[in-house]
Image: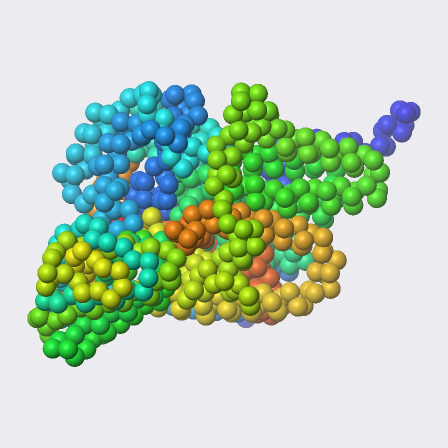
Amino acid sequence: VPAGSRVPFLTLICPREIVRRRWRRERGFVTDARLKITLGTGLLVGAIALAVTLSQSPVTVAGVSTVAQANIGSSSTTTSECEPGGTLPSATTGIRLRAFAFLGSRVAVEVLEHGRVITRGGRGSGWTAGAVTVPVRPLARTRLGVELCFALFVNGDETENFVGESTAGALAAHATGDDLSGRVRAEYLRPGRSSWWSLALSVARRMGLGHAWPGTWSVLLVIALMGGVAVLCWRAILRGLQ
Amino acid sequence: VSVAEAAVAPRPVRRTPRAVLRRVPSLAWLCAAVAFLNAAAWSLITPPFQVPDEPEHVAYVKVLAEGHRLPSAEGEFSREELAALADTRLQTVAEQPEEQPISSRTQERTLQRALARSEGGFEAGGEYAGVAASEPPLYYAIQAIPFTLDGTGNLLERIELMRLVSALMGGLTALFTFLFVREVLPAVPWAWTVGGVGVALVPLFGFMSGSVNPDAMLCTVTAALLYSLARGFRRGLSRRAAIVLGGVIAVGLATKLNFVGLAPGALLGLVLLSVRAARTLGRAAYVSLALALAVALGPVGVYVVAHVVSGAPALGIVSDAIGLTHGSAPAELSYIWQLYLPPLPGMHPDFAGLFTARQIWFDWYVGLYGWLDTTFPGWVYDFALVPAALIGGLCIRGLITSAQTLRAHVAELAVYGTMCAGLMVLIGADSYIAFPALDAEYGQARYLLPLLPLLGVVLALAARGAGRRWGPAAGALIILLFLAHDGFSQLQEIARFYG
């Protein structure tokens, strides 16, 4: 080794490393500095995104418009409904309406207090399954006696079904479009108080239930499997992309 | 032949399975390992039956393994499966994002007791497999092996074993994808890894490969088919290669009905390869074609003859579906077009207010799991457009730089195009049966998963499009992006079912 030249530490303790490095050099294997920078930056950004996500709180149901869950009608044309006598909890960030569609239409929601809109939101078409969540602007305090109005801009082809409580008279939804026989179930969503970090143990316990060979071991196995995936990806990048 | 001539003549190479496996590059195995581990993780995260149609697919295996017969579309599930479905709360949880599976030890004990009580062999009257009953039996016959091997386990344990077999198939899909990308882009070895690993990390692919669903095997067969075709276009069609190609098509037809959409493209490829081979081999090439077609279509022929002889419709239960189609052919074609693309002038809008390419195919590829009830917050789908556009832009750049090479592969591209179009038309035609009561019954990104190897090529081209200096870095970034997408998708599923 020429005097003053840098000798990698690994080659001093592992003679095979000398052979390996020479073999790689002879075949033109050079790890690109850009590759290393990309990898490092990507992993850092990923780790930050994960930490931020897990620091947030899961969405919880702060209130519901009705407890019952029965089919109260369907609509195949644009429908707008208003349900009086509701309560909008404070900090509500989304309203989940119980409507079933395979390919849901555009939805708009407004909450009115004494005839004045206090919050509103909307979401585009393309939602599916048995509920549609519409994000709304959160309010600082709970409002009582509000009117929840929503409109579904159905295209006239697919039918959308509504779930809620069959009621009569003043409490039922007032519709323009297809009539419903009651109030649509609406759930008011807001972020909970605990972060995902603090809920990790209870989530892990629940993951161990209802599966084959029940137990929290499955969570550890999932972590090990995904750790293996990450290591293999790292290896694939360093081996394959140079 | 003299002794001297025999001594210098090249010895025929014996291709033992071990020798064939040894020739597979280690990076291809690495891609396979990534896909398998990822799918295995998905199989543990997803609660039993919380994958579209999994109860029906499990029922099919159960009837085949225990009753040694094909299932029926009528009747009801076996007692054991009914107990499992009830106590895992399938009816309450599926399609209801606010509902969750069991969450207490008491419920767990009830479930275990119910499973132990209802355990047993085949029950007469329990042959129901619903929508799965019309599918061919090959995938289910393979799944019957782990189902039977775990003789003492309960149904949930058997489901997990079957899911792991699907995960193995997912690993093979990634392996064939790597090999396919290698054949298609032989000049850019570093980009093969981007295609192979990228596909292995597609979350929807992991979700489906971690479940009991013939889509897992359909993806494997299609990837093997694409690889065989690409290999044929690069190295010519020998008799062995023709028979292998025919065999892959036969396996595909015996795996899932959706393969019918891919078969015309595959057969076109076989014919084009034979015509090309005939320039050097003469008539022998057409003999190879005939053999390949016999291998490919033989099982279907036997199936049709057996039904005709027994007085049943020629295509069995499939004939009923064909009879359900309605409306005029132009209306159906217009619907199929609009299922993927914006309507052309003069077309009646079948999806008013909906940009299907974005809202059905892109958004649902980005994140739609469980019984179509597990989604990301809305902003994620908007954000996903940015990396998708970047990858698309780089891919187009990669295509432009290799335009000259592309022109030399028009026939090959036509084959892949026909396969894509065939599958898309099949999905559209099937969806049209339920239209307009349901806008797009089969408009789900999972049905396009067999085309994943082509996504692998797109990813590799995108990395190549970044140029020689930045290409590897762009490739690494694509892999990290897919890894992050996969990880956050798993977290979303955990939040939905256990949060």
* Image quarter of the C terminus of chain A: bottom right
Q: Position of residue B361 (x, y in %)?
A: 46, 58
Work out whether residue B164 or residue B99 is closer to the camera in this orientation and state it. Answer: B99
Point out the residue furthest to the bottom here: A116
Left or right of B215, for residue A143:
left
Q: Nearer the viewer, residue B199 or B334?
A: B334
Residue at (39% x, 21% y) in the render? B67
**Who is closer to the viewer here, A232 or B90?**
B90
Rendered image quadrant of residue B405: bottom right
Position of residue B146 measured from the top left corner of the image (x, y, whole percent): 40, 29
Viewer-side residue, B434 vs A204: B434
Q: Is residue B123 visible?
A: yes
In the rendered structure, the answer to whether residue B275 lies left or right of residue A219 reads right
What's the residue at 58%, 28% (across, down)? B304
Q: Residue at x 55, y 66 (%)?
A: B346
Q: Could you tell me residue B176's position as x and y percent? A: 57, 45
Q: Quadrant of residue B85?
A: top left
In the rendered image, the quadrant that contains the N terminus of chain A is bottom right
Residue depicted at 90% across the width and 25% down the height: B1
